[in-house]
Structure formats: structure tokens, C-alpha cells
Amino acid sequence: MTSHSPRFRIGNGYDIHRLKKGRDLIIGGVKLEHPNNLGLDGHSDADVLSHSIMDALLGALSLGDIGKYFPPSDNKWKNADSLILLSKVVELIKNKRWIINNIDSVIVAERPKFLPHIDSMKDNISKVIGLERDLIGIKATTNETLGPEGREEGISCHSVVLLEKE
């Protein structure tokens, strides 16, 4: 087998968290208001956008997933700000001499409405990653009342990243 060092790597990430009362709804580092006063349940702040981006970055370089680096069994990460976790993953990617070219994400939820918050989410992700805002795609869609997102049991996010070797 010959060694192959690709110039580009693509990563795909996915995350879903259950909605529940008594938790903040934080996505892309932005605190949102759910009409039923629901938030995302998880060991950290359960920010599905940040989590899916982290998994996409790690997956692009075959480095595992966020559970490997921030296990729910470690109380150090209890209620952690996911943007801080994202910064640690970005540092790992940069230390391996890769550049993040672009990110594209889609949040799947029936409510709340995300459009008014997309710019703030992009600003937060841009600052943490050091990537221009126009290289970060964040969209939201409903699941047309189907599945756990459609029944408002949870919110999910899918992300794709493109990395380039320095």
C-alpha cells in the first residue's frame, strides 16, 4: 500500500439532544427562547451546532469524536460552554497543520425560529474558528412534524467541513 497525503479532507458531523424543561437553549453560542420554555439536555450546554461542527472537524482527520476528548463521564466538562470546546478542537486541527476552508451546517427543529439568530451564531463560530463569516453556512429547517425534531422531542444538526493541508 502506498502512502497518500491528500491536500483536502472532508468531515461530516451530526448531533442531536433532547428538549426538556429547566435547561437553557443554546445553539451556536446564542441563548434562544423556546415557546414552551424548553432547552437542550446534555452533559455540556448541549449546543448541537457546535457539537456537529466539532465532530465534522475531528472526522475529517480520523481523530474520533467529541466523546473521546470531552467524555460525559468527566465532570470537568459538566455544563461546559461548547464554544470553548470548539476552540480546543480547532487548536488540535491547526496543530496538525490543517486549515479550515469552510463549514456548512443545517439545524433541524420545528421551533423556535432561527433566522433572526443566524448572524449572531455565525459571528460566534467565526470568532472561535478564525474563519470569515461568509465561509460559514448555517441554515435551519423543520422536519415537517416528522421524527423527534418534528414532535419537538429534540433538536439536531448536520455539519460538513472542508480542510486543506497547510
Image (cartoon, rainbow, N blue to C red):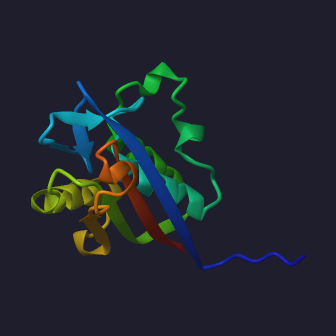
As drawn, the residue found furthest toward the top would be 75
Query: Image height check: is 39 above or below 53?
Result: above
Percent coordinates x, y for residue 140 in the rendering: 26, 63
Q: In which quarter of the image is residue 115?
A: bottom left
Which part of the image, by quadrant, shows the N terminus?
bottom right
For the point 32% across and 44% down, the residue is 83
- Kindly tell me whether residue 97 is visible in this rendering: yes
For the point 24% across and 41% down, the residue is 26
Q: In which quarter of the image is residue 85?
A: top left
Query: Image height check: is 106 above or below 48?
Result: below
Percent coordinates x, y for residue 48 in the rendering: 36, 48
Query: Image height check: is 5 above or below 124?
Result: below
Relative side of 108 to 100, left or right: left
Q: State the residue in front, 72 or 21.
A: 21
Relative side of 94 to 49, left or right: right
Query: Image height check: is 106 above or below 18?
Result: below
For the point 52% across and 23% down, the residue is 74
For the point 16% across and 51% down, the residue is 112
Percent coordinates x, y for residue 47 in the rendering: 33, 44
Percent coordinates x, y for residue 54 in the rendering: 46, 52
The number of numbered badges drawn on the structure is 0
Q: State the residue in front, 152 or 94.
A: 152
